[in-house]
Image: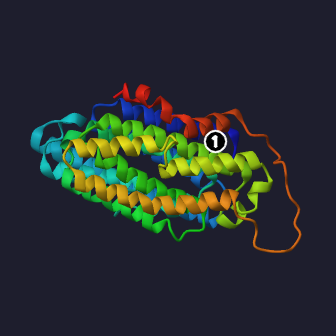
Amino acid sequence: MNPQAKLISISSLLLGTTITISSSHWMMAWTGLEINTLAILPLISNPHHPRAIEAATKYFLVQAAASTLLLFSSTTNALFTGQWDITQLTHPTSCLLLTTAISMKLGLVPFHFWFPEVLQGSSLMTSLLLTTAMKFPPITLLLMASPSLNYTLLTTMAIASAALGGWMGLNQTQIRKILAFSSISHLGWMTIIIIYNPKLTLITFYLYCMMTAATLLTLKTTKILKLSTMMTAWTKIPSLSATLMLALLSLAGLPPLTGFLPKWLIIQELTKQEMTPTATIIALLSLLGLFFYLRLAYCATITLPPNSSNYMKQWRTNKPVNTLTATLTTMTITLLPFSPMILSML
């Protein structure tokens, strides 16, 4: 891609995100979301491959529909109450439409169908943007409007997302699709607690972004896109394959890794709110995700290629591991002992 075009796209992404997260008026929030959508489209369609063009088209159609619903929700609220403020969404129809619109933006079940397909058609770095930075503005709107949301609908979608994200990831062989279903599952964990403790949702989102970024940057360094290539990738950088295994287990939420912290805090908060059945269901559903993460970890470090033919072992990659990948991977593995400091932020 032309460097100038890439600079314009990245600058527009930063501008759109800043406008959305700093606005208190629905029209400004909508404008920021639209700038974001238009800025990411050239990055998705950059490889000039039919899959990339298809992914960009799907992304545009879904985001445009979600933005329309968002605008319809805010104008309906303004019509009945005279309020354009994000925190003053009180009309029941508007609350229902807003919950639906942001669920479409994020990719919550049952509006999740576009997300795995778009990620599969994108490059690893664009996938990193789609799973982290592009979810930040909708999550911020969800936090600001959390008292107004339709909680029954939100809880139902959260549990369905945790279930389907784990279930659909079981039979996948493409790494990007597995990470897409992982994202859907994590979004279920974030949205189920948003009414009771919005700050906990934000901390969960930050930790998820860190763990996903570490995983995707590692995959980019080792050039892994599917399970079959992951099986032979241990010959490139053995130490990086070992840390990839730990990063994947951290995403699964196994103690004593960082990913255990948000799950532990969410289950604790749900229990405090006397929602023990919900906490039990979502904890059991995380076992589905654990299964495919364990399969990825197994392929990353333990499996040898199932053939007897000779092949060239590539002991070094062309590029050295950069500092960002090393830092994020270290934080993904070792942040649990710092949980008292993280809890003090709540």
User: Looking at the picture, how far across and down is residue 28, in whole percent?
Assistant: 33, 35
Q: Is residue 27 left or right of residue 258?
A: left
The residue nearer to you, when weighing 113 against 252, is: 252
| Residue at which label 1 appears | 5
Amino acid, disc 1? Ala
User: Looking at the picture, how far across and down is residue 131, in whole percent?
Assistant: 50, 49
Q: Locate residue 120: give its quadrant.
A: bottom right
- Outermost residue toward the left in this view: 80
Q: Is residue 35 above or below residue 41?
A: above
Label 1: element kind: helix
Q: Residues within 10 Å of mark 1 (few under 14, many from 20)?
A: few
User: Looking at the picture, how far across and down is residue 199, in whole percent?
Assistant: 33, 34
Q: Locate residue 30: give its quadrant.
A: top left
The residue nearer to you, when weighing 108 against 118, is: 108
Q: Identify the residue at horizontal 41%, vertical 56% (top origin).
A: 185
The residue nearer to you, when weighing 51 against 278, is: 278
Q: Identify the residue at horizontal 47%, vertical 59% (top origin).
A: 289
Q: Is residue 191 left or right of residue 10?
A: left
Q: Is residue 321 above or below residue 343?
A: below
Residue 42 visible: no
Q: How is the image coloured?
A: rainbow
Q: Identify the residue at horizontal 55%, vertical 68% (top origin).
A: 172
Q: Is residue 119 left or right of residue 242?
A: left
Q: Is residue 201 above or below residue 50?
A: above
Q: Identify the residue at horizontal 79%, vertical 40% (top origin).
A: 320
> Total number of numbered labels?
1
Quadrant of the drawing holding the C terminus: top left
Residue 296 visible: yes
The residue nearer to you, when weighing 86 against 166, is: 166
Q: Locate residue 231: give its quadrant.
A: bottom right
User: Looking at the picture, how far across and down is residue 187, in whole percent?
Assistant: 39, 51
